[in-house]
């Protein structure tokens, strides 16, 4: 059986170790020459409930969720309950017999006696490796590579554990070979030179590449994964990671670090970021750079803490009291995650402003295949100067940017104040100085070079789909699947300030379609407020799930029809 791509869904309780299957299998797929992507749906509990992971296998790059299920691996007795609307007669369901017959379906069923097999190894903990063997065989992955990955993964636990995992893999392989099922996907040998990577790793790598050497944060899903990643590289990359007592302390620690000469970042989610609002304003008036990674999840309040949404654009856009410039970036691809996070540190340092990197649960918890980045081509510029005796921290300049010096590095006095201040940093209530200082700060971005939208298709097409952030993969695939020469996709990696070409680009289309993972079309509102442009069609989703390719094909197809 051969098709353009396959969707494999793993269904289990929280705590059953789906991550083991996901990480090992996607590495196996990559080394075997397949493009792949993993999307995860997690319930907000440590154990129990039902978590699912969708693994897509394709002959070309893919980074989007689909609704259909081609192969379903059921690891728990309730594993079918939430998936019935995604199962049809073509779905192959594999698992213990009582698990896969728990609900009546039209799907093809293939029962495997995995519990009995695992008893031979003395533990049910090897179940996940058994199913790696099943999937590896169904999709003709290289067995020797699989054995090598298992040895590497479990070597720290001892030789017996490695041997048992390889036996479990072989049991799974044997079970799959006895079936009548086999799936064929065209290989791409270039994939073997690429890297299997998680979304949160791209943000961490971009931060390290950008010179991040200090991170202060308070744990909050889904942002914590970035904090953990950087903590795991403290020694190898000389980065100090501090778990602060709360988010207020975290943002102020980061500002203090920049003041002392470090390149600092905070990583947080909506509720935590709300507490950082005063610190963001402090960054604005003290002209202290800071990079904020804001990992979005559905609100208001605690909302759905383990699901996804693009609901915090307005929060980033308007956080902090008073007026001051800021830049907001939102990666859509794995490469974006690395390059835009790197760029965030360069922008923050050069313009002495807060820079936001917006992701979400879908992006951070996702996994995929990425081409290796040539870091030698990424610039890292330090804009700090040694102060002279006449140094003025807030000297009025045509660009609005004053030289930034570090205390103790030079002859000058580096005075920074959160009240309105004179050029040398002293508190003032002069109306004239206040207006001059505000004008100075507000013209900082006058020379800023925008990151312009990426166009997939002909930018002169009659119909233009607009998206930002993690919707990139689903929109791109839907537009390509529709195959209409008069349809194009404009992706905005920079959502604020609106790039200079935005108005020209949107005005050239006869029909504008906006796709956003929120309830109020926050990016669409921003475009309407600043440019007076209204979208003809708005496609929104805010149930905690990402868009599927099928949904967008249907909705965009209706517009084209």
Image (cartoon, rainbow, N blue to C red):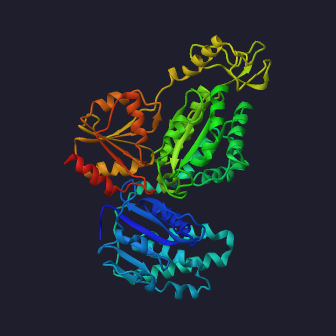
Q: Residue at x 78, y 14 (%)?
A: 389
In the visual, does 457 lie left or right of 200? Answer: left
Residue 382 found in image quarter: top right
Q: Nearer the viewer, residue 118 or 146?
A: 118
- The picture places residue 72, in percent across and down from the top left corner, at 41, 73
From the viewer's perspective, is residue 493 above or below residue 75?
A: above
Residue 266 found in image quarter: top right
In the visual, does 453 lie left or right of 426? Answer: left
- Can I make out residue 317 in this image? yes
Q: Residue at x 47, y 71 (%)?
A: 11
In the visual, does 273 lie left or right of 367? Answer: right
Residue 63 found in image quarter: bottom left
Q: Nearer the viewer, residue 438 or 5?
A: 438
Q: Nearer the viewer, residue 3 or 429?
A: 429
- The picture places residue 323, in percent across and down from the top left corner, at 57, 26
- The picture places residue 355, in percent across and down from the top left corner, at 57, 35
Q: Residue at x 42, y 32 (%)?
A: 452
Total numbered labels placed on residues in the image: 0
- The picture places residue 347, in percent across and down from the top left corner, at 57, 31
Where's the N terminus, which quadrant?
bottom left
- Residue ranking furthest to the left: 561
- Can I make out residue 139 in this image? no
């Amino acid at each position: 059986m051969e098709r353009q791509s396959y969707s494999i869904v793993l269904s289990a309780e929280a705590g059953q170790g789906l991550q083991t299957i996901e990480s090992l299998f996607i590495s196996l797929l990559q080394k075997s020459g397949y493009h792949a992507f993993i999307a995860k749906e997690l319930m907000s509990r440590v154990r129990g409930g039902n978590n699912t992971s969708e693994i897509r296998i394709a002959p070309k790059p893919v980074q989007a969720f689909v609704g259909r299920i081609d192969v379903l691996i059921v690891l728990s007795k309730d594993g079918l309950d939430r998936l019935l609307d995604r199962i049809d007669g073509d779905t192959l369901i594999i698992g213990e017999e009582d698990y896969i017959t728990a609900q009546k379906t039209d799907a093809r069923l293939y029962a495997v006696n995995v519990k009995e097999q695992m008893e031979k190894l003395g533990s049910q903990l090897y179940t996940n490796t058994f199913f790696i063997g099943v999937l590896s065989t169904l999709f003709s992955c290289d067995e020797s590579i699989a054995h090598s990955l298992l040895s590497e993964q479990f070597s720290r636990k001892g030789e017996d554990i490695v041997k048992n995992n390889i036996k479990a893999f072989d049991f799974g392989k044997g079970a799959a070979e006895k079936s009548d099922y086999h799936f064929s996907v065209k290989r791409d040998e270039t994939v073997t030179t690429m890297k299997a990577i998680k979304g949160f790793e791209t943000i961490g790598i971009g931060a390290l590449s950008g010179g991040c050497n200090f991170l202060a944060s308070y744990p909050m899903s889904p942002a914590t994964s970035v904090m953990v990643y950087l903590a795991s590289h403290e020694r190898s990359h000389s980065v100090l990671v501090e778990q602060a007592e709360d988010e207020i302390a975290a943002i102020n620690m980061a500002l203090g670090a920049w003041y002392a000469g470090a390149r600092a970042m905070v990583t947080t989610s909506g509720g935590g970021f709300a507490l950082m609002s005063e610190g963001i304003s402090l960054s604005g008036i003290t002209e202290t750079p800071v990079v904020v990674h804001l990992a979005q999840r559905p609100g208001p309040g605690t909302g759905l803490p383990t699901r996804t949404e693009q609901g915090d654009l307005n929060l980033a856009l308007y956080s902090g009291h008073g007026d001051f410039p800021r830049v907001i970036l939102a990666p859509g691809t794995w490469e974006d995650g690395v390059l835009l996070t790197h760029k965030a540190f360069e922008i923050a340092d050069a313009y002495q402003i807060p820079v936001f990197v917006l992701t979400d649960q879908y992006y951070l918890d996702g996994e995929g295949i990425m081409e290796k980045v040539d870091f030698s081509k990424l610039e890292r510029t330090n804009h700090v100067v040694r102060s002279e005796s006449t140094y003025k921290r807030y000297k009025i300049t045509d660009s609005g940017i004053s030289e930034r010096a570090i205390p103790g590095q030079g002859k000058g006095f580096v005075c920074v104040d959160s009240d309105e201040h004179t050029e040398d940093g002293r508190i003032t209530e002069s109306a004239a100085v206040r207006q001059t200082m505000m004008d100075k700060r507000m013209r900082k971005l006058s020379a800023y070079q925008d990151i312009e939208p990426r166009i997939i298709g002909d930018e002169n097409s009659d119909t233009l789909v607009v998206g930002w952030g993690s919707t990139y993969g689903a929109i791109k695939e839907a537009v390509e699947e529709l195959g209409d020469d008069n349809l194009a996709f404009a992706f905005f990696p920079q959502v604020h300030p609106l790039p200079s070409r935005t108005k020209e680009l949107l005005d050239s289309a006869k029909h504008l379609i906006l796709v956003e993972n929120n309830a109020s079309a926050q990016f669409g509102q921003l475009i309407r407020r600043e440019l007076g442009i209204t979208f003809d069609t708005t496609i929104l989703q805010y149930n905690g799930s990402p868009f599927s390719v099928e949904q967008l094909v249907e909705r965009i197809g209706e517009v084209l029809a």
